[in-house]
Image (cartoon, rainbow, N blue to C red):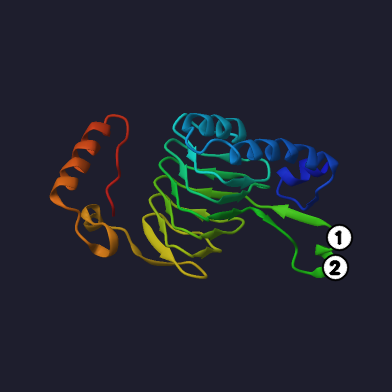
Amino acid sequence: MSNVERRDKELVYISDDEVFEEQKIARKLTQELNTADRSDFAAITGIINKLFGKSYEDTFVNPPFYCDYGTHIEVGKNFFANYNCTMLDVGMIRIGDNVQIAPNVSIYTAGHPVHPATRNSRYEYGIDVTIGNNVWIGGNVVICPGVTIGDNAVIGAGSVVLKDIPAWTIAAGNPCKVIRKITEEDRNKQFAGRDIDDEAREDIQRIEKEENDSVKYPTAP
């Protein structure tokens, strides 16, 4: 097998000339993205749609943004990533609908063997990362290879996610652990348990009702 084939099968591989040729495409596009007019939102989205393997017209990433390939990144509808996001997409990064990523988040599929003799052979690996629908990733979070984050989860700022996080949970820490489940009581809450005011709550209910034909928002367990 070629090293590209080995990489794509989640086997250890070496970054040879064929691998670097693939990376050159992403480097050119990320340079274009990171030097674009930051107020030209349509141009930014256009570059991202060229870069990502799967994206939509409402996909938006606030530059700067960094990745290895771009083609190994698939995002759902209404995706947003804030400033200084890094996705090392040696393996696939699959992200669902309505996912919000705060500043300085890093998603790593790439890794190296821990034994120095094996690591110094130049062999490395990429293991897929999956993030479900309606997930919010807080600032400065690091997501490590092989992790799956379930639908509707929230990852607290500064977390290092080493293991899978179940759906409908708030998780945080280093290493990241589940703090509690998300419930229907959270529907009308904002920061630190503060109530959402009546005016905003009515507007939220109106928006949800209008969107229910196309998007059925889930009920918390």
Residue 110 is at least partly visible in this image: yes
On screen, residue 59 above or below 122:
above
- Residue situated in front as seen by the camera: 171 or 189: 189
Considering the image in quadrants, where does the C terminus appear? bottom left
Question: In the rendered image of this protein, does residue 64 appear above or below residue 191?
Answer: above
* Residue 30, horizontal then vertical, whole percent: 64, 40
Res 1 visible: no
Residue farthest along the left direction in this orientation: 198
Q: Amino acid at mark 1?
A: Ser
Residue 115 placement (x, y as % from top left): 79, 69
Q: Position of residue 116 (x, y in %)?
A: 81, 69
Q: Quadrant of the N terminus?
A: top right
* Disc 2 target residue: 117
Q: Secondary structure at mark 1?
A: loop
Residue underneath mark 1: 121
Q: Secondary structure at mark 2?
A: helix
Q: What amino acid does circle 2 point to? A: Ala
Q: Are marks 2 and 1 in contact (CB under 8 Å)?
A: yes
Q: For the point 43% across and 45% down, which residue is it? A: 99
- The residue located at (27%, 33%) in the rendering is 211
Q: What's the residue at 82%, 39% (across, down)?
A: 18
Dot 1 alpha-carbon crowd within 10 angstroms: few under 14, some 14 to 19, many 20 or more: few
* Quadrant of residue 207 within the rendered picture: top left
Q: Report the side of 187 relative to 13 (left or right).
A: left
* Residue placed most toward the observer, 13 or 59: 59
